[in-house]
Image: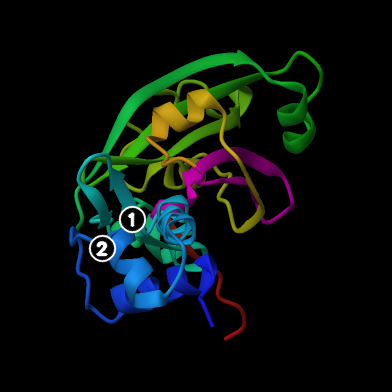
Amino acid sequence: MPETARQIADDLRARIDDGEFGPGARLPGEPALVRDYGVAKMTANSALKLLVAEGVAVSRPGSGTYVREFKPILRDATKRLSRDQWAAGKSIWSADVGERPMTVADLEVYEDDAPRWVSRALDLTDGARVVVRSRRFLVDGEPVQMAVSYLPAELVRGSRIAEPDSGPGGTYKRLAELGAEPVYFAEDLRARMPSSDESAALSILPGTPLIEICRTAYTSDGKAVEVNRMMLDAGAYALRYSFGG
């Protein structure tokens, strides 16, 4: 019985995972898939497009379809937000990427009126000001995430949080020094298709969704001190959440 495009894509993915096709390797083309799986050319083409859409492979017109060379980032939310991480002066990003080269691009830090949804999240009065930290992250030279943080200006104005370089341990360590140490975090996550601007900024492959995460940081008395809206290339990430002991 002829295989479906989904079955062929899953089989090719398994062969990639097993190491038969390593990073940068050329995958079998349409003629080979037609022959090996007994399918129509359209089905073979659809199978390859599925792998491209899922971020497993990249298409090079006139050349073929190749295994994506970028290794997905394992984002362990529990580990990266641990106090042991930022209190020791480490970037929470180092929990994700380890020794892989990571750079920050398009960093902007400024004060502005709080958007209405931010005012609600931070329990601010109408017209309150926030310090905004906007940036784009690149790993191994590839853009993988955009993030915009909002913090009450009344709390952080004049601190290093309002400067481009927030110092060792980043924003959370500076908040602790201000007497507003975050001890509890809540993340809301959803997947959606990216806008054209988001696709361009993150070089998202066609058909690949965006992961949007909105994190709120709270002090021990329940006061919200930061809202961070993150947009991740779904093809560049695997997400992990740990629970219990």
> Mark 1 highlights which residue?
57
Q: Position of residue 158 (x, y in %)?
A: 46, 21
Q: Name the residue: 23% across, 56% down.
A: 69
Neighbor class of circle 1 (other Cα within 10 Å; few <14, some 14-19, many 20+) is: many
Find the distance from the CA under tag 2 to the CA under tag 1.
Answer: 9 Å
Residues marked 2 and 1 touching at CB (< 8 Å):
yes
Disc marking residue 27: 2
**From what the image shows, is residue 168 above or below residue 120?**
below
Classify residue 37 by image quadrant. bottom left
Q: Nearer the viewer, residue 180 or 196?
A: 196
Give yes or no for residue 52 being in the magenta stretch.
no
Q: Main secondary structure of the magenta part?
A: strand
In this rendering, would 132 be left or right of 37? right
Residue type of the residue flagged with mark 2:
Leu
Pair 2/1: label in front: 2
Please state, as top left, top right, bottom left or bottom right, where the N terminus lies in the image: bottom right
Q: Residue furthest bottom?
A: 245
Whether residue 95 is situated above or below residue 155 in the rendered picture: below
Tag shown at residue 46: none
Please state the horizontal and vertical placement of residue 51, each as a whole percent of the image: 42, 59
Residue at 81% x, 22% y is 125
Residue 88: x percent and y percent? 33, 59
User: Magenta stretch?
Assistant: 207-236
Report the residue at 36% width, 48% height from top: 169
Hey, what amino acid is under mark 1? Ala
The front one of 145 and 209 is 209
